[in-house]
Amino acid sequence: MAGYLFRRLVQSALILLGVSFITFVLLYVLPADPVRQIAGRSATAQTVENIRQQLGLDQPMLVQYWRYLTGLVQGDMGRSYLQKTEVSTLIAARLPASLLLMAGGIACELLIGLTLGVVAAVFRGRPLDQGLMVVSFVAVSAPQFVVGLLLLYVFAVQLGWFPIGGYGTAAHLVLPAVTLGIMGSGWYSRMMRSSMVEVLRQDYIRTARAKGLTRARILIRHALPNAILPIIAMIGIDIGIFMGGIVVVESVFGWPGIGQLAWQAIQRVDIPVIMGVTMVSAAAIVLGNLLADLITPLIDPRIKLR
Amino acid sequence: MSEPVQTAPAPAALPAGTLRRLMRRKLALFGLAIIFLVVGGAVFAPWIAPYAPDDQLFEGLTLFGEPMPPSAAFLMGTDLLGRDLFSRMLYGAQTSLIIGVVANGVALVIGTLVGVLAGFLRGWIGAVLMRFTDLMMAFPALLLAICLAAIFQPSLWIVAMVIALVNWVQTARVVYTETTSLAEREFIAAEKTLGASRARILFKHILPHLIPTLIVWGTLGISVTVLLEATLSFLGVGVQPPTPSWGNIIFENQTYFQAAPWLVFIPGAAILLLALAFNLVGDALRDVLDPTQRGND
């Protein structure tokens, strides 16, 4: 176990190293010149050159990358070109909002997805099951920005139940969280359905039925816990999808998270911020995958880590 | 009729009756119908479209300069600039389909190459390829796509390439798993014993057996591609106006969506239906082509 963990940690670190290098190279070849952006349109050639030297952008790429990397290892992500603030400060200020949104999204995804999956499994082969599986396909095919705008139109503009956008109260969270969760709920309902169908075929369910337990009790006490466990590990793998989803959802709802931060940074060629958000996202994805792999054997002792 | 005896099962591209069994599924038929409708609309757009897609019609705006709701003259209403939405939707279908097919095709080719090479050659080349795939998995895909699209001035083809660069990873992993398990099967071992070259094994046996998997992933992948293109265009880094795409129609008009909801929800519904169609057909194909995936019904 310790050996496995060590190997996976080294592997994760290498992956993050690779992500940082590729992102750096991509941003380095950027045709838009960040120095021009900082200096403004009326700056003289001399000013532009001075700023370039100040930021060290006149040096070769590998030197710049090495400097960034040594800073990153010490927790220094550099300064934003445009906001004159530490990138880590900017991200730390935006992260809680995004984490809240993601937690809400995961809760919606599981609540909707698992419920639909269980109902479909119980009624498998009947019209209700087929109907729910069509619904799950619609959910995975719906673009998040359309879902977001639709929910806004119906529940905020027409019915006035929720605020149109912004951040602050629990009411602000509902629509963005549902929007973020809907696509995943489609996948979860399908996985939950097949997991549940599988469990309902097992001998111990037949035994429980033979003992004369009620249908409800068999479902809730015997089938559900066993069917849910393999699904839980999937949440870790979802982090990557959520990291993309928050850019869209935060933009639709004006949610002040790191998705918005990244989006604004990309538009203004604020390279240190783009780098910072990419690294934080990649770290979250790698961590999520690691957790998913570590949880699996705890859930199912038949699986051994190698 | 009869084929000469072979050491390996004849690698037919598709099992006989695939189409017939596909046709028996109502949902797959529904999906195919939508795909035909969209393809038809895109191909015949110049003849069907009542107006030119870029034509800012004088009668397309109200006296107050507002877009017109759907009517007999404008089937889907007009947009903020007084252009006919139905005509723009038809030409937008061309954009969605071109990107869907091209981006997904390129992604499929890259993914297959990486997956087959890694799974067939193994060794250090295989290890390097798969580690690179792991690395790509750690990238936040949408963020990467936005970054790439913002770096290069987005044109139709650039957007397609960006999407392909982000989307090949899943295919590579599936193909890799499939190839490694194929390479261990008896008929491949028999071929090797008979002295077949590596190229013969690769092209005559491994690749043909991957075709069903590739068809399934290729179909499901178009749905992912359509959604990604729409998302990029919605954020303004995808296909650039005035070239219509279903995503950038929403991007151009979203500020006005409370007053003119059709400008957001008609293209929105179109994106959903097209993605849904490819998902339904892809899922049905998987059931038909891969007996191990059935069972749960």
Image: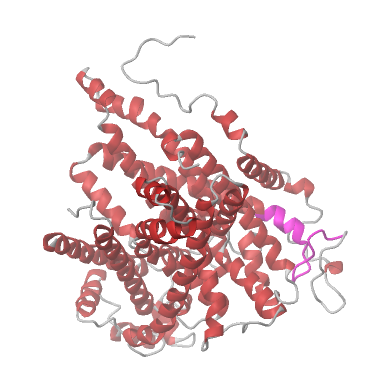
Using residue A15 as the reference point, say whether residue A132 is left or right of it: right
Return the x and y of residue B280 as percentages of the image width and height: 57, 46
Write down the region rendered in magenta.
B73-92
Residue B37 in which image quadrant: top right
Return the residue found at the far front. A212
Q: How many marks?
A: 0
**Residue B70 sits in which quadrant?**
bottom right
Q: Is residue A284 left or right of residue B39?
A: left
Q: How is the image coloured?
A: secondary structure
Residue pictured at 44% horizontal, 83% vertical:
A97
Magenta segment: does it hold A165?
Answer: no
Figure check: A135 above or below B68: above
Q: Nearer the viewer, residue A291 or A211?
A: A211
Residue B84 in magenta stretch: yes
The answer to whether residue B140 of the structure is visible from this angle is: no
Residue at left offset 67%, top offset 47%: B38
Q: Quadrant of the N terminus of chain A?
A: bottom left
As rendered, which of A299 and A166 lies closer to the eye? A299
**Residue B277 visible in the snapshot:** yes
User: Is B32 above or below relative to B148?
Assistant: above
Horizontal and vertical percent for residue A65?
25, 72
Q: Nearer the viewer, residue A59 or B162?
A: B162
* Residue located farthest toward the left when viewing the structure as drawn: A3
The chief SS type of the magenta part is loop
- Indicate the position of residue B171 as horizontal and vertical percent values: 39, 47
Q: Position of residue B108 (x, y in %)?
A: 43, 44
